[in-house]
Image: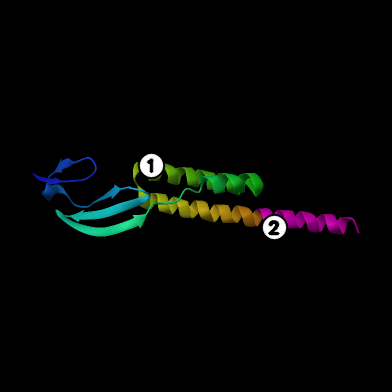
Amino acid sequence: MAQIYNDRQVLVDVNELQHTDRYFSPESQYYRTQIHSGREIDRGYESEPRDYMCSAMMACICCCWPLGLIAMYFANSANDARAQGHFEEAKKKNRLAKVMIISSVISGILIVGAFVVIQFYSQQ
């Protein structure tokens, strides 16, 4: 048995260890280490995924609400994944949330613009 230190300090059999990632999150950073057959490969510090929930809520309230609701769903899923330590999954869900937020804002602008144009030409 070989002891590999992580945040839980679990004893692990090196022969059974194929691939794991472990994450430390001091001050909005996480330290990623890959372990292959007992040999650690240092991958350095990466930034922690952002929280897009506030932006998604504003997109839902102020812009196109159906797309805003979808953005809120993906932002919530990303926050759940980040809380569990699955940072790669959180980054993927954050990307989807950001796309939906941008789509909601663009759709809201187009809808308001179309409404203004229709009102302008209906008065003439």
What colour scheme does the image use? rainbow
Crowding near the residue tagged with mark 1, few <14, some 14–19, many ≥20 C-alpha atoms within 10 Å: few
Magenta-drawn segment: 108-124
Rendered image: mark on residue 83: 1
Whole-number angstrom distance, CA of label 2 to CA of label 1: 36 Å
Judged from this view, the residue extending furthest toward the left is: 1
Question: At label 2, which amino acid type do we have?
Answer: Leu
> In what element is the residue under mark 1?
helix
Q: Quadrant of the N terminus?
A: top left
Q: Point out the image quarter for the C terminus.
A: bottom right
Seen in the picture, residue 120 relative to 63 is either above or below; the reply is below
Mark 2: secondary structure: helix
Q: Which residue is mark 2?
A: 110
**Residue 94 x/y as whole percent:** 46, 52
What amino acid does circle 1 point to? Ala
Q: Per the image, is 109 magenta?
A: yes
Question: Residue 6: image x %, image y %?
Answer: 22, 45
Identified at 81% across, 56% down, the residue is: 118
